[in-house]
């Protein structure tokens, strides 16, 4: 329990920074959906889908490789860090240069021929973020969560602040016919959604500068003889990351491409904008998963050789699912309040996909927790295979059903993808690195959360005069069931 408390404490610190940072970004959703119509928000949704892929590509699994090789006996952590950093700086610089040279052809392919600046901006954004990932990993490995948190919060604060400046100060002032020195100097109404991207670009520059001391602290001459085994270890993680991001983000790309021929540009972008905004309502699960992963990955590696480590991993899973299932129930019981994070009612037509996406993300969180088996056994090729398996499901289901069911098909494809990956990973893990997960407890906690939500829907509690208060009883019911399951650990 003391080890679990340590993990919980680090998760809380990493989680607080992630939650504060992501929540500040989350506050941009009501701002963007209030300022931009769904078609314009669709541009933001699509461009950030490409960013997610590029970040995975440019880091090519070296973040996890840093954790693995810096803790291996005989390796100098400073040498490992310097070698990985040199590799990333070199590859990223080449990527940014190529993006600048071929900006117009890339913009034409993206169907934004008049906005080649988007290509250049995002190339710099993802390049800086890719390089920054390694000093951030160094902070995690050195157990310096406060500095880690400070950098991330500063990054998001700059991003949010600039969004507010451009969209809440400059835009309304110009639209009302007014002007100031600031608007005359820094604002052009024709840039539109581009200011969302400019804000992100400047925030990434700030993060990079803040990490510079960590980046160059104690740097030594890289040793490329150790780079090859790191690349071999990381390559399956790259494939897994790309396939995993395809599972998470590729539906945004496919929605536009598949709906455009039949619905036209305006309707296709409307569907994309609605789906992207409603997907944000599943953010609470994503926040918890991200916070947990930041703390858990180095934790799992550090506990590998300790007695009872597998039983510890199982216990971590139990508490992890307990929290996620409770979050699912809380969001869905109070969806009539959460929806106001999207102030424009044009987007609310997509709320029906929120429970599907929430449960899909719980499956993804369980899968990430299970991934300990192939990372600790150095069988990362299984991770790549599982992610590719999920990507095939994602692509096939979206290809078949998007033309008929639109973004609803994308939500169910995400559910099927993550659910399948979770099950197959568990079965493979039983063979290669068995962990005694408490399946009964996991099933009861997930099942009870679903049952309480289903009861609220069937009884139409949301339509009752005191429905919001009545839902507290369902939350208490879930907590009572959980307490009965966990009371032994709680008492010990």
Image: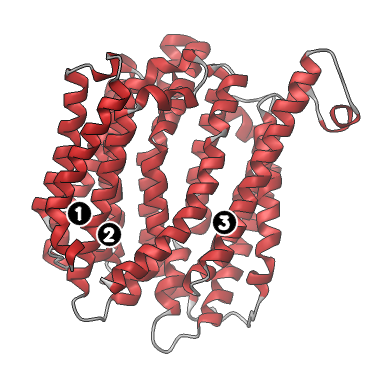
Residue drawn at 89 percent across, 26 percent down? 180
**Residue annotated with mark 1:** 425
Residue drawn at 59 percent across, 76 percent down? 82
Q: Are marks 1 and 2 in contact (CB under 8 Å)?
A: yes
Q: CA distance from mark 1 to mark 2?
A: 8 Å
Q: CA distance from mark 2 to mark 3?
A: 23 Å
The answer, for residue 437, to whether it is visible in the render is no
What is the quadrant of residue 30 in the picture? top right
Q: How many marks?
A: 3
First in sequence: mark 2 or mark 3? 3
Q: Residues within 10 Å of mark 3 (few under 14, many from 20)?
A: many
Q: Is residue 238 above or below residue 419?
A: below
Q: Horizontally, is 124 left or right of 234 in the view?
A: right
First in sequence: mark 1 or mark 2? 2
Percent from the top left, x then y, of residue 93? 66, 57
Percent from the top left, x then y, of residue 431? 11, 64
Residue drawn at 39 percent across, 31 percent down? 251
Q: Label 2's element?
A: loop
The quadrant of the image that shows the N terminus is: bottom left
Q: CA distance from mark 3 to mark 1?
A: 28 Å
**Residue annotated with mark 3:** 130
Front residue of this view, candidates 427 and 380? 427
Furthest residue in direction left, as rendered: 440
Colour scheme employed for the rendering of this structure:
secondary structure
Q: Horizontally, is 481 left or right of 77 in the view?
A: left
Q: Label 1's element?
A: helix
**Residue annotated with mark 2:** 371
């Amino acid at each position: 329990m003391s080890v679990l408390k340590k993990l919980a404490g680090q998760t809380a610190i990493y989680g607080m920074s992630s939650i504060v940072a992501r929540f500040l970004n989350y506050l941009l959703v009501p701002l963007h959906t209030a300022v931009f119509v769904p078609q314009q928000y669709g541009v933001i949704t699509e461009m950030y889908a490409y960013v997610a892929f590029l970040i995975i590509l440019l880091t090519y699994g070296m973040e996890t490789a840093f954790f693995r090789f810096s803790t291996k006996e005989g390796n100098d952590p400073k040498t490992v860090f310097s070698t990985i950093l040199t590799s990333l700086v070199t590859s990223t610089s080449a990527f940014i240069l190529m993006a600048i040279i071929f900006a117009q052809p890339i913009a034409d392919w993206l169907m934004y021929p008049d906005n080649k600046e988007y290509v250049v901006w995002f190339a710099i954004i993802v390049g800086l973020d890719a390089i920054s990932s390694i000093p951030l990993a160094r902070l995690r490995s050195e157990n310096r969560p406060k500095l880690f948190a400070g950098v991330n919060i500063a990054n998001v604060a700059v991003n949010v602040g600039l969004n507010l400046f451009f969209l809440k100060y400059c835009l309304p002032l110009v639209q009302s016919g007014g002007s100031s020195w600031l608007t005359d100097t820094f604002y052009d109404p024709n840039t539109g959604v581009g200011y969302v991207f400019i804000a992100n670009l400047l925030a990434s520059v700030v993060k990079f500068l803040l990490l510079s001391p960590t980046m160059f602290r104690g740097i030594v001459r890289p040793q490329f003889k150790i780079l090859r085994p790191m690349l071999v270890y990381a390559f399956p993680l790259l494939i897994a990351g790309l396939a995993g991001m395809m599972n998470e983000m590729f539906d945004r790309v496919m929605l536009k491409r598949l709906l455009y021929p039949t619905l036209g540009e305006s309707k296709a972008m409307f569907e994309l904008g609605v789906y992207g905004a409603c997907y944000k309502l599943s953010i609470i699960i994503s926040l918890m998963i991200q916070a947990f992963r930041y703390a858990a990955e180095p934790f799992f590696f550090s506990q590998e050789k300790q007695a009872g480590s597998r039983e510890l991993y199982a216990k971590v899973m139990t508490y992890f699912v307990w929290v996620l299932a409770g979050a699912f129930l809380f969001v869905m019981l109070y969806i009539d309040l959460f929806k106001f994070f999207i102030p424009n009612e044009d987007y609310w037509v997509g709320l029906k996909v929120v429970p599907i996406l929430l449960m899909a993300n719980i499956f993804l969180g369980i899968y990430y927790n299970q991934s300990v088996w192939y990372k600790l056994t150095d069988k990362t090729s299984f991770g790549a295979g599982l992610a590719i398996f999920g990507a095939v499901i994602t692509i096939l289901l979206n290809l078949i059903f998007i033309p008929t069911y639109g973004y609803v098909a994308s939500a169910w494809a995400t559910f099927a993808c993550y659910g399948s990956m979770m099950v197959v990973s568990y079965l493979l893990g039983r063979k290669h690195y068995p962990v005694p997960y408490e399946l009964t407890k996991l099933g009861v906690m997930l099942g009870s959360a679903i049952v309480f939500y289903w009861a609220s829907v069937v009884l139409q509690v949301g339509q009752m005069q005191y429905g919001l208060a009545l839902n507290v009883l369902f939350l208490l019911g879930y907590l009572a069931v959980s307490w009965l399951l966990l009371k032994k650990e709680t008492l010990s």
